[in-house]
Amino acid sequence: MMKRMLITFFIFASFLSMAQQKDSIQNEAKMQWFKDARLGIFIHWGLYAVNGIDESWSFFNGYISHEDYLKQTEGFTAKKYDPAKWVELIKNSGAKYAVITSKHHDGFALWNTKHGDFNAVKGSAAKRDVLTPFVNELRNNDLKVGIYYSLPDWSYSDYTHFTREIKRYKISEEPKRWDKFLNYYQGQLKEISKNYNPDLFWFDGDWEHTAEEWQAPQLRQMLLDRNPNTIINSRLQGYGDYATPEQGMPITKPKSKYWELCMTMNDSWGFQKNDHNYKTTDQIIGIFADVIGNGGNLLLDIGPKADGTIPDEQINILTELGEWTSKHKEAIYGTISGIPKEHFYGPTTLSKDKKILYLFVKGNPNGEVVVRGLKNKINRIWVVGNGTKLSHKVVGKVFWSHYPGITYINVPDHILDKRMTVLALLLDKPVELYREDGAVIESN
Ligand code: GLC
């Protein structure tokens, strides 16, 4: 009896683990393009660009009344909006996907939704759907389509939260009213899913309610039923596919297998005329290298103006970034996270077979670059995007220990990139590192 129970248990357990394995293989396949993409462009475009104020938060936090916030609809003209130009700029930056705010917390939708009139077509000077042409351009240019959608809708009269001070109602007291909101927001998402079949859904604002209240598992299922390969960011109360750190670059390698840092170029998500606090292109490249070296993606934000033009500072950054990413593409796309920083004091990536190690060198290393504890033989070193071969020397290797010594690579000034140089080290086999305490005598 006991034996039979045990056998049944093991058969059951092995089925379970087979199913889990299948799941994780499927998940890996679905996440592959995202993992390889490394760079995406985030777009915050909405009413807030008119006055140049904080997206949605400006009225939620009481810096402007809701009524005055809504007056921005008259200035949202999209008069010079040229989605082909946007996509050209995005593509040239080296990004492989874009994520656009279809609707922020203020509830203003960029597409012609059948759910309500608060959208670019029926409720703004633009009088047209400004989302669809952009999505079409992305598709025509083989870029992946990400749709940002705010779960909270602070302008919708049957949503719970209005401002920081004013809550409209409690779900426990008016469950029917909440149901009405659920129908509304899920209806909009059905539309988005049907119209655009996004490669990625980027949710925001999940903190205002629990997974149960949002009906997060049902929502996830609904989106996956339409497209099993669609990817969902983490802001769905535990029902997403990857981690979403915001602004703060992870200092140590995050534990989650898939992650994406979203970051502004200045201090604002949307266009703010008054915000000139831009990061330099060099700083952005440095952050990008750190992000990919730690195995993540960078989702770099732009905020177009209300007329649809992109601010010059942002165009410049994207263009300069593009020059650098295109020169260094072999070290960026399709690579995986690099080696621990003790071995090289800077970001690194690896080819998928781990036989090419890419070192990202900032500034002028004054003639040489150091790699510590590399057990491999280096077959060849070249400068990425330039091709010059470099020589190297191993120092401090002793015959009585398997300690591999210290590798010094000669780096002449004339091969340096003005922003960040990348060196490729072709190894004899997948990278192997010495991680012990130091050379210990084994025989002499
Ligand atoms: C947020 C904010 C928001 C912004 C977003 C981008 O949490 O609510 O305004 O759009 O993050 O990541």
Image (tube, helix red, strand yellow):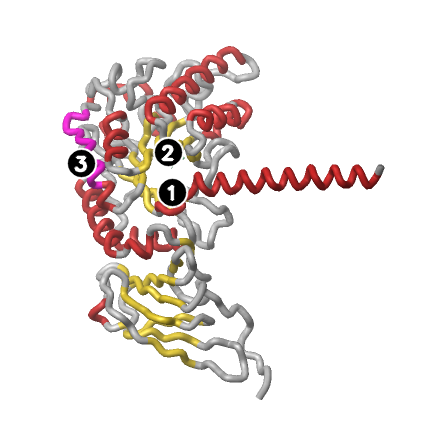
Type of amino acid under label 3: Lys
Magenta run includes residue 225 = no
| Disc 3/disc 1 C-alpha distance (Å) | 24 Å
Say what secondary structure mark 1 lies in: helix
Q: Position of residue 182 (x, y in %)?
A: 47, 17
Q: Residues within 10 Å of mark 2 (few under 14, many from 20)?
A: many
Determine if the C-beta at disc 2 is less than 8 A from ligand 1: no
Above or below, 357 relative to 73: below
Taking the image as drawn, is residue 264 in sight? no
Amino acid type, label 2? Asp
The amino acid marked with disc number 1 is: Trp
Quickly name the residue at label 1: 33
Residue 19: % across, % down: 59, 38
Q: Residue 381: in sight, yes or no? A: yes
- Region of the chain picked out in magenta, as a range: 78-89
Quadrant location of the N terminus in the rendered image = top right
> Where, by quadrant of the figure, is residue 2 drawn?
top right
Q: Residue at x 43, y 60 (%)?
A: 354
Query: Could you tell whether 333 is left or right of 49 in the image?
Result: right
- Dot 2 falls on a residue whose secondary structure is loop
Classify the position of the C terminus by image quarter.
bottom right
Find disc 2 in the rendering and name its residue.
Answer: 199
> Quick check: 37 above or below 229?
below
Residue at (31% x, 56% y) in the render:
330
> Along the line of sight, which residue is nearer the eye, 256 or 9?
9
Q: Earlier in the sequence, mark 3 or mark 1?
A: 1
- What is the number of the mark on residue 85? 3
The residue sitting at 32% across, 55% down in the picture is 286
Q: Of callouts 2 and 3, which one flags the residue occurring earlier in the amino acid sequence?
A: 3
In the image, taking residue 294 as reference, residue 382 lies left or right, namely left
Q: Is residue 83 magenta?
A: yes
